[in-house]
Amino acid sequence: MRPLADTYDPKAAALRCLNFRKRILEISQQVGALHIGSAFSCAEIVECIYYGLMRYSGEVNTLVDTFIMSKGHGCMIQYVILEAMGILTKTDMEEYCTPHGRLGCHPDYGNPGIEASTGSLGHGLPMAVGMAIAEKRKKDPGVIYAVLSDGEIQEGSTWEAIMMASSLEINNLVVFIDNNDFQSLGRTSETHPSFYPVDQKLSAFGWETVEMPGHDSLNIYRTIDARSGKKPMAAICKTTKGKGISFMENVPIWHYRSPNTKEYEIALDELRAAHPGVDF
């Protein structure tokens, strides 16, 4: 087994995330709406999982570990990564959310690279726990990585899975909570202030927990790479919804909306300005 690369290069990671955001913007011009803010908030997290943390055996696209996008509405970042890796095709992306396409606004199991149907929030983590249990029966178990939204933590099934994972001593499970402090159209800290401090709650349930910036790819990689491996791990990632585009950041309407032509051009200009010297 080997990682996709022997070293995780933060400059390469930043360039990939730039291109992923650009690609999502391109797709946004083909459909009436997509969950652009949610995809942008977890771009660095998902990129780090695929390009830094998950292990591959033999060919690059043969995964040893498993990824679950529990916050299914953020699946555009997963789709564009799978396209970049050659697992999804350009045609798949161009037919996104069309009657004859196979990619919908939430992930569907059976499509290339998709390990679980998610989007009904609260289901992804229970499935990840079950997969981790199955993997532990192997001589060399794979690691299950899952990305959850902070709004999703309100689901009772999520807490049942959190309790079960630690009770069964599942140590091959790593969960990222995309803590952008938004649930659809309101701030989590305002609608559900008792959500915080979530790290202490997870620790009390027997998890190894860490709170960290969610847009620092190298820090994400180093933190997870250094985990003890004795308990399930939860990383509470402080993120910005719509990260990278000023008029989208922390603006609720961008939970589910596509930019118009003028907004699209402005967004591209902002990406260019933030990455001088990069031609795209």
Image: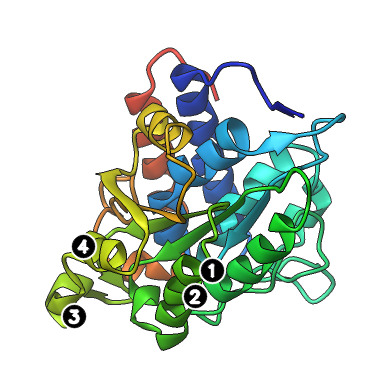
Q: CA distance from mark 2 to mark 1?
A: 6 Å
Q: Are marks 3 and 2 in contact (CB under 8 Å)?
A: no
Instruction: Kindly identify which numbered label has been placed on residue 192.
Output: 3
Q: Which of the two discs, 3 and 2, labels the residue nearer the N terminus?
A: 2
Classify 114 as above or below 205. Answer: above
Residue designated by label 2: 164
Label 1 amino acid?
Leu
Residue designated by label 1: 168
Q: Of tags 3 and 1, which is closer to the observer?
A: 1
Q: Residues within 10 Å of mark 4 (few under 14, many from 20)?
A: few
Residue closer to the observer: 196 or 233? 233
Q: Which of the two discs, 4 and 1, labels the residue nearer the N terminus?
A: 1
Residue 152: give x, y in percent of width and height. 40, 75
Instruction: Kindly identify which numbered label has been placed on residue 200.
Output: 4
Q: CA distance from mark 4 to mark 1?
A: 20 Å
Q: Residues within 10 Å of mark 2 (few under 14, many from 20)?
A: some
Label 3 amino acid?
His
Residue 277: give x, y in percent of width and height. 43, 12
Residue furthest out toward the bottom: 156
